């Protein structure tokens, strides 16, 4: 299990290093988004496999990554709001758009400075050493045994699935606050990224389940984007208040439509004891039972 955990962490750290460098170089909205995803995946990996790594090293990584995530969130919120402004009918020549673009530029500079400091400290090498991953890639690419991770997944993932369904039913219930939906969105991300860690021990049936989780995240993300944009527009300068309020009304209406779409998808795809039973049974019984590839 230690070798499997190290392999998963090394792979996600490699991806994180790539996304850090790309975000500093290109600074595009998609780059910031991909950086945040890479951080979440690596952080979840550290959490799931925490018993197999030095606790002090993991805490230092989490602490540094939280700082980066906070800075990246500011950039991402501006990117989302700028994107939604176009849907709300606000042109790129407006004062409101110019204010957001200027604020986004400053936020990106702050993020880029932090990422550059991280790179200058050669964090890839330092973290591999502190997490004791340095020997992982020196094994010649051999695949660790899957018995131990399969045993772990068969016990841990079904329990995570039960919590996911419980929180999902609560978030999808009528009258629930946006905060409940946001909390479920974060929980669904953690669940998906945890399941992804054990993709090698499951068969092709996991692909469809991961796709369904990704669709849940997309619905939830759409609702969260609207809420974040409205919150940011509350701070618009005095000269843009009227256009900001008009944009907010349109974005709030879009958020309501997206909320209804999430509830419909949840009811259609997840809101059934049988669906939950199928998920938990699959995660419990099919860990380590990968189908052999067919030969031509």
Image (cartoon, grey):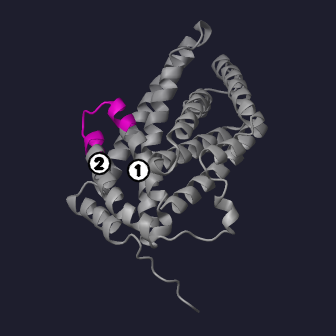
Task: Choose top left, top right, bottom left or bottom right for residue 125.
Answer: top right
**Which residue: 28% across, 67% down?**
281
- Stretch in magenta: 168-183
Q: Viewed as shown, does residue 75 lie left or right of 195? A: right
User: Mark 2 touching mark 1, by CB under 8 A?
Assistant: yes
Q: Residues within 10 Å of mark 2 (few under 14, many from 20)?
A: some
In this image, 124 relative to 194: left or right?
A: right
Question: In the image, residue 168 lies at what x, y percent?
Answer: 30, 46
Q: CA distance from mark 2 to mark 1?
A: 9 Å
Q: Position of residue 142 (x, y in %)?
A: 63, 71
In the image, 216: left or right of 92?
left
Residue at 58% across, 7% down: 238
x and y, in percent, of residue 273 in the image = 21, 59
Of helix, strand and loop, which one carries label 1?
A: helix
Residue extending farthest to the bottom is: 296
Magenta span: chief secondary structure = helix
Identify the residue shown where x is 38% and y is 61%: 152
The circle drawn on residue 163 is: 2
At a point 58% along the width and 28% down the height, the residue shown is 67
Q: In this figure, which residue is indicated by the disc labeled 1?
A: 191
Quadrant containing the C terminus is: bottom right
| Residue 169 on the magenta segment | yes
């Amino acid at each position: 299990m230690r070798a499997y955990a190290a392999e998963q962490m090394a792979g996600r750290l490699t991806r994180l290093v790539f996304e850090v460098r790309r975000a500093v170089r290109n600074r595009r909205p998609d780059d910031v988004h991909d950086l945040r995803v890479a951080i979440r995946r690596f952080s979840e990996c550290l959490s799931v496999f925490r018993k197999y790594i030095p606790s002090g090293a993991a805490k230092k990584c989490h602490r540094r990554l939280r700082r980066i995530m906070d800075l990246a969130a500011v950039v991402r919120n501006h990117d989302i709001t700028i994107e939604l402004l176009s849907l709300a009918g606000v042109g790129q020549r407006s004062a409101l758009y110019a204010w957001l673009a200027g604020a986004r530029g400053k936020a990106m500079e702050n993020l880029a400075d932090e990422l550059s400091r991280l790179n200058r400290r050669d964090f890839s090498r330092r973290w591999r050493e502190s997490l004791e991953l340095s020997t992982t890639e020196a094994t010649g690419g051999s695949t660790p045994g899957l018995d131990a991770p399969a045993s772990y997944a068969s016990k841990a993932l079904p329990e995570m699935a039960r919590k996911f369904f419980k929180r999902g039913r609560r978030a999808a219930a009528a009258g629930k606050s946006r905060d409940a939906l946001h909390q479920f969105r974060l929980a669904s991300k953690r669940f998906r990224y945890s399941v992804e860690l054990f993709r090698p021990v499951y068969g092709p049936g996991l692909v469809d389940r991961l796709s369904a989780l990704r669709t849940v995240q997309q619905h939830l993300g759409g609702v969260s984007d609207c809420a974040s944009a409205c919150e940011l527009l509350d701070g618009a300068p005095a000269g843009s208040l009227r256009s900001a309020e008009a944009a907010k009304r349109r974005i709030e209406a879009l958020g309501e439509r997206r909320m209804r779409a999430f509830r419909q998808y949840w009811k259609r795809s997840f809101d059934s004891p049988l669906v939950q039973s199928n998920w938990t049974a699959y995660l419990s019984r099919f860990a380590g039972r990968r189908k052999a590839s067919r030969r031509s």
